[in-house]
Amino acid sequence: MAMQPGKPMPTEPLNAELNDRAKHLLKVLVESYIREGQPVGSRTLAKAAGLELSPATIRNVMADLEDMGLIVSPHTSAGRVPTAQGYRFFVDTLLNVEPFAPGQIEEFKQSLNPDLGYEHLLESASRLLSGVSRLAGVVTVPRQEQSQLRQVEFLQLSGNRVLAILVMGEREVQNRILHLDRTFSESELRQAANFLTAQFAGKSLNDIRQSLLADMEDLRRDVDAIMRTAILLGGQALAPDGPDTSRLVMQGEVNLFEYQELSDLDKLKQLFAAFNEKREILHLLDRCIRAEGVQIFIGQESGFEFLDECSLVTAPYSVSGEIIGVLGVIGPTRMQYDRVIPLVDITARLLGAAMHS
């Protein structure tokens, strides 16, 4: 069930209100909970923080953090766990992100070999995200509207049917069967294909459709017969498709079973139903295509109820400077942000480079 997209809580006022000691204790608490998955008590926190503070001082700081909504005490434990707002403050203010070593990046690059082909590249990127993060990796297949046309071919079939072959980008080939009002000769089809290729090669499908719609108005007037045929055939061959959930490649959903906070049966059913349906996740990722760089949704910030206990880290990937898709990682809110954020960033860069090669 979709809700209004959530907005990250502003962290600037909290940053000004918290002193360095409170920030350090919060950072240690969040890192401990991400690592262990267990509520953090004051004694454990004092030992992990490495500060000479009394248990009473630690408890007072934790009470202040709880009053600010950054941590909460589960009913079954005297320890504390981060809230979504606590994770947001941690990510925005306290997180130290370590880039991957050159050797690791080279391994990632080898798994995204340009020779794999278009579909296998997307699957490999999703598998890389899932395998390294031990969470769910997602990659959107570029929308046809954002793909550039390279070549058009038309082949005569039986009856009034024509096979349209569209070569998109570097590796994608689309076949469509057109049902027409009359039979076209082989010469007419070849001339129409040559005209469309010459006129529109290198342009996006959106731009081509707008041109064809404008040219349709000219059909009432005296236009060249080749152009008339090309406009009629091109209008059908390049018509937009309906919603297509095959545009989302996912790997590693079962990894989420390992996290206790996602073990509630009703929550899991809701989450995996969304994974299976894909439409809501695809809608969220498509929103991210307008953003620059890594974007992070924590809990309700995504605007989708099934992700209330999860975080989503995304980044767009580009070819020749044009954003054509989005990839990311879905996992519990206690994911290793310091590892996932650079992983998503470098995978987006490497996938774009591989698709450009």
Image: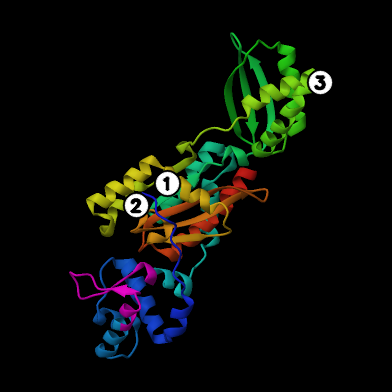
How many neighbours does mark 3 have within 10 angstroms: few (below 14), some (14-19), or many (20 or more)? few
What kind of element bears circle 1? helix
Q: Residue 46: x percent and y percent?
A: 29, 83
User: Does 182 sit above or below residue 73?
Assistant: above
What kind of element bears circle 2? helix
**Residue located 61% across and 43% down the image:** 355
User: Does 33 sit above or below residue 290?
Assistant: below
Left or right placement of residue 193 versus residue 56 in this view: right
Q: Which residue is identified by label 2?
A: 306
How many neighbours does mark 2 have within 10 angstroms: few (below 14), some (14-19), or many (20 or more)? many
Q: CA distance from mark 3 to mark 2?
A: 55 Å
Q: Residue 313: x percent and y percent?
A: 46, 58
Numbered tag placed on residue 120 in the rendering: none
Q: CA distance from mark 2 to mark 1?
A: 10 Å
Query: What residue range appears in magenta?
Result: 64-86
- Is disc 3 in contact with disc 2, using a CB cutoff of under 8 Å? no
Q: Earlier in the sequence, mark 1 or mark 3?
A: 3
Number of numbered labels in the structure image:
3
Q: Is residue 97 magenta?
A: no
Whether residue 127 is visible to the viewer of this picture, yes or no, is no
- Is disc 2 in contact with disc 1, using a CB cutoff of under 8 Å? yes
Depth check: give the residue in front, 319 or 287: 287
Disc 3 marks a residue whose amino acid type is Asp
Q: Earlier in the sequence, mark 3 or mark 2?
A: 3
